[in-house]
Image: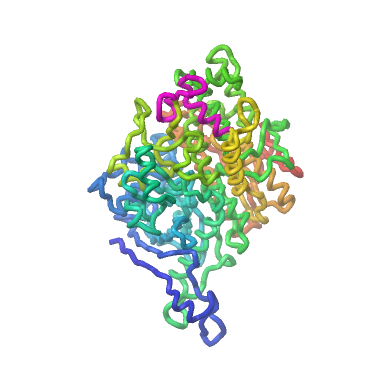
Amino acid sequence: MNQTLKLTVLASSLAACGMLAGCGDSGNGPEDLNIIPSYLGTVTVTNYDGQSDDLLTAGLGKTGLAAAAAPAYVDPRNPTAAELRRNAIFANYRAVLDIAANSGYGTLYGPNVNAAGLATAGEGKVAGAEYIAYADDGSGRMNVTLMVQVPGSFDPANPCIVTGTSSGSRGIYGAIGSAGEWGLKNNCAVAYADKGSGTGLYTFDDDSVNLQNGVRATRTAAGKNANFAPVLTDAERATYNTTYPGRVAFKHAHSQLNPEKDWGKVTLQAVEFAYYVLNERFGTLASDGKRHLVRFTPKNTVAIASSISNGAGSALLAAEQDTKGLISGVAATEPQIQPKTASGYTVRQGGAPVTAQGKPLFDYSTYAALYQPCAAGGAASVGRCTSLVAKGLLTGASAADQQANALAKLKAYGWTVDAEPLQGLHAGTNILVAVTYAYAYGKFSVTDKVCGFSFAPTDAATGAVVPFTAEQKAASFATQNGIVGNVVYEDGTNGARQYAFGISASTGVADQSLDGFLCLRALATGSDPVTGGALSAALAAQSDRVRAGIAEVQATGNLKGKPAVIVSGRSDALIPVNHAARAYLGLNAVAEGSASKLRYIEVTNANHFDSFSNALPTVIVPLHVYLFRALDAVYANAKNSTTSPLPPSQVVRTTTRASNLVPITAANLPAISASPGANAINVSGTAVDVPN
């Protein structure tokens, strides 16, 4: 049976002691007391038996996670917290891994594959305890969800912690299948954070929110316990709901806090939470017989900051901001990391400087939002290509020429040639990113209708806004990835439609709402993207707000001498290596010079989404395997740097499959080499040299 226990902060005992630590006298001097961090609210702990339910698979096991559909709710309009957790783990695990046949699931990775990389006949369930709490400043507006999972196999004699900050805009289980799985299999506590951008759906029609456990409640009933509630009066809510029925708000876009600026901080808070939890579980009692003494500290515990995508960027930021020595090392894949500058270092591939480097996410995502829909080709791209040509932003007499020119522009803006087969497939994702981050960086309200965009469910056939059903709202904690609904363009001449259906007023063409994306591009650059001229006063002010938000999230590149391994796929069309991983390596060279312990592994035929490895087997291999190899390397190095040096920076050359009928094997995914030879990536001074 699962058992839930509420742990509360005993403020009176702290006041009586008058100290945060060193309180109480054992007769041999002050005791080092385990004190709950002041930013944490109520902590909920649930124990899982590893059979009916567990930490990694929510009781589903390897087989259940690979099922064709998520488990059904007993009452779809009122799912329980346990059912929502189960389905959230089902959805999040599958979101970051390819679980299709022949993909490597169950053979190279998956719950049944043990820490040594060997497939077993088991289901891979992990018994243990799960602690959850909000981190907040007392306002109830931040309410960052933190979670610590402690497997039953945790070894106090060899303590370790791994961070699992969520990828994308996902909720607290967003890293369950990546860093979470590695940590649990290696007997480590896993410190998760949803970054303050996790699942938080607000619906205007019924004024409802998600609670921490995913259950829905009204904004009034939730109070300060809402995962997210927009800052609106009842009158403002009613007016917006009447004017824009069916629209929604969600935390990452509409919290007005720019949560990304705190992603490093909340990752560090998750580590502190993990130390608190471990000392409560395994520390001896203090002399008062109530509290526990500190047993685990950064001096005797290995703590690795890890995750993928936004979570990987968070790990790097946490290492940069670590003033307490909480983190031993970093292992991150496909990091969404934004260097504070694009100059002062040089990135070269095959001896030639790359075409662009170190640009911010909002810059290149708004550029992609212009050209990737044309680069996709096909009937849907014709309107976008036509309008770009008419505005002098693209050339080509034929559709094929226009598509080729769009791909050429993307390459010139910093994407690799290897990413070209995936450019069109990423158009929708980059559009979601561009609109979401415009709101986030500018700290705009949901009611601001930035560049004419909003979010809502839409009809697949017409693009018209449709309301969420009661069942969809109830299940939102499990089904939504943190970016909720579809991008709606409100200002098209054909009325509010999902962006792909939008007709621009300036062109009269069904060009996938180009006017709106030109507006977003203006926010990124501060000038008119067509004429190069000045913006209107209102748009210029919005651009200033967005660019101020971007400045709040940029990285310094200084990892303070921590051992670190970054892994990225050369074919990444969402987070181009020239703007993120490669550029960060250059920035790190400027910041740390010869003191740096950063290594960079670039994997050919790998991209941002492993799911493409089964859809495009002749083009893509799964990058996930290399996250685990990076974690293995960093962990071994943290335990003994003399006998386990970090691997050199290098290009790993993989082999794709002839079709998805052919199982992928270890032969497709060669090991990270201790002696890469001609595949070495070299850093000389502030120049990064990547071989072709």
Tell me where residue 243 appears, x and y as whole percent: 37, 37
In the image as oriented, which residue stretches furthest toward the right? 685
Q: Quadrant of the C terminus?
A: top right
Camera-side residue: 473 or 651?
Answer: 473
Could you tell me residue 663's position as x and y percent?
43, 33
- Residue 682 placement, left or right of 208: right
Left or right: 122, with 192 as reference point:
left
Residue 470: image location, x then y, percent: 28, 43
- Residue 644 lies, with reference to residue 155, above or below; the image says above
Residue 268 seen in the figure = yes
Q: Nearer the viewer, residue 552 or 611?
A: 552
Residue 603 makes an appearance in the image: no
Residue 29 among magenta residues:
no
Q: Is residue 175 found left or right of 641 in the rendered image?
A: left
Specify the segment rendered in magenta: 493-521
Please name the residue shown 54% across and 77% down the image: 19
Looking at the rendered image, the quarter that the N terminus falls into is: bottom left
Number of marks in picture: 0
The residue closer to the viewer here, 601 or 389, is 389
The residue lying at 51 percent from left, 75 percent from top is 33
Relative to 129, is 570 above or below?
above
The answer to if 503 sits in the magenta stretch is yes
